[in-house]
Image (tube, helix red, strand yellow):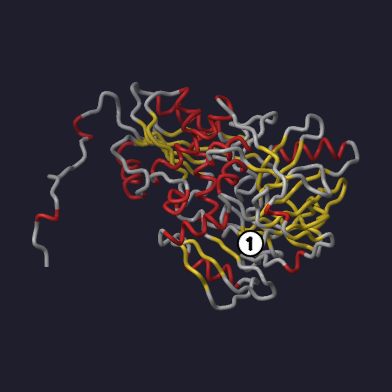
Amino acid sequence: MDLKDCLKKLADNGRLAHIKTEVDPYHELAGIAAKFEGGKVLQFDKVKGSEYPVTTGWWWNRDNLACLFDCETEKLSFKFADAVASLRSNPVAPIVVEDAPAHYEYQDEPDLTKIPVPTHALKDGGPYFSNCIVIAKDPDTGVRNTSIHRMMVTGKNRLGLLLDVGRHLRDYYERAEAKGEALEITINNGVHPAYYVAAITPSAACPIDMDELAVASYLLGEPARLAKSRTVDVECIADAQMVMEAEILPYVREPEGPFGEVSGYYAKQEDRWVINVKAISLAKDPVIHMLHPGREVWNSVGLGVESNLYQTISRQVPGLKKVYMTHGGSHYGLILQMDPPKNGMAKNAILAAFAAFPPLQMLRVVNSDVNIYDAEDVERAMVTRCDPAKDVIIIQNAFCHELNPTVVDNIGAKIGFDCTYPVPKPERYDKISYQEVDLANYEIE
């Protein structure tokens, strides 16, 4: 199943809306998307300056994703967790196919100005690819890595790139650069979301010597399909709508940014890494896929992190029920739902979560009688079950995520709130309840 098959499935289930009026990719497209954020997936049929339509909003609604993955919404993160677990239990390697749909049209002289790349936020430094799947090979072992990085269009065949600290792609690049070599990559746009899940698999769940594409294979129910490239020695995704064959240049840094990031704030402009695009290939009648900054980022990162954290924490602390990365906290805030069998175990879960996911900075643990998706219910647990004198953990000078504005040189503080009641449960913590009734039995005018 490719991106177009997914669009058809979304349409068949009433989850796709078409914007028929021509829109400008410079701010207008993102401005319209912001009005629809959280609802149906969008397809912009006419984008000024390009012959290709653009789709966005796939990740801003978990119900849309549950439709594509044929599962209940609340079970989505568990499905992803099973896919990540397959890396160690029964990984299914990708296959390389001939006659890839992504190679329908080949452009040896790439011109990115013809691709409808939106300029999203008002202060963004330029048009940005926000969700492309980057595939690279370890310069020493040849093991593939799959990841996602923001990329700003700076020329017809040139992109600015952010390489986060601690990411495997940066490790690959630094070893290639030390040899004076460019790092070859493919940049894949418009793919089944299974590939996106593979690309956002946390490093803690997939060591540098593992190929994340097995995660995509698990979710697809068949081996992920790759194809050989013409100008680089790295495979592309065979069913992508667009592929850029490219290289990250050694010892070259150019201005990149600002960009409206996952934190909800702008990442400032700095001299960063540079990509030279060598060739572009396109599927027949391609649809370009963009990620709208905001809920799409929070859901995509959240679902991947939730699944990994659930597995990691469960192995260390009993009683865990659910994990939720809140939208308000982007990927710096987390809620754990658990019923600790013994006093003190909620605090152990807090420490386990901080260790498992370094960007995390604020964490709350609540019991299973609290709806973790209801901010008011969580706040009520905080003010009635968390004693600030003994139930708050603060960790200073810890490694954090560089894009959070409170963090300086990747160093910041972390705080955890134990909002669980004592074990055994005191009667004073019985929540108010009411008789269950079926409104269908009543005449209501």
Relative placement, left or right, of 11 versus 280 is: left
The amino acid type found where label 1 is placed reads Ile
Q: Residue 286: x percent and y percent?
A: 65, 62
Relative placement, left or right, of 302 versus 260 is: left
Q: Quadrant of residue 402?
A: top right
Residue furthest front as drawn: 99
Residue drawn at the location 58% of the way across and 25% of the way down = 88
Residue on which disc 1 sits? 288
Relative placement, left or right, of 115 versus 422 is: right
Q: Which of the pair 20/424 is nearer the observer? A: 20
Q: Residue 243: x percent and y percent?
A: 72, 54
Q: Which of the pair 283/401 is nearer the observer? A: 283
Residue drawn at the location 55% of the way across and 52% of the way down = 297
Residue furthest right as drawn: 180
Is residue 385 depicted above or below 280 in this figure? above
Q: Residues within 10 Å of mark 1 (few under 14, many from 20)?
A: many
**Quadrant, the C terminus:** bottom left
Is residue 40 depicted above or below 434 in this figure? below
Q: Residue 122: x percent and y percent?
A: 62, 68
Residue drawn at the location 74% of the way across and 60% of the way down = 105
Residue drawn at the location 81% of the way across and 44% of the way down = 184
Q: Which of the pair 391/3 is nearer the observer? A: 3
Residue furthest bottom as drawn: 21
Is residue 25 depicted above or below 267 in this figure? below
How many badges with numbers are in the image? 1
User: Dot 1: what SS?
Assistant: strand
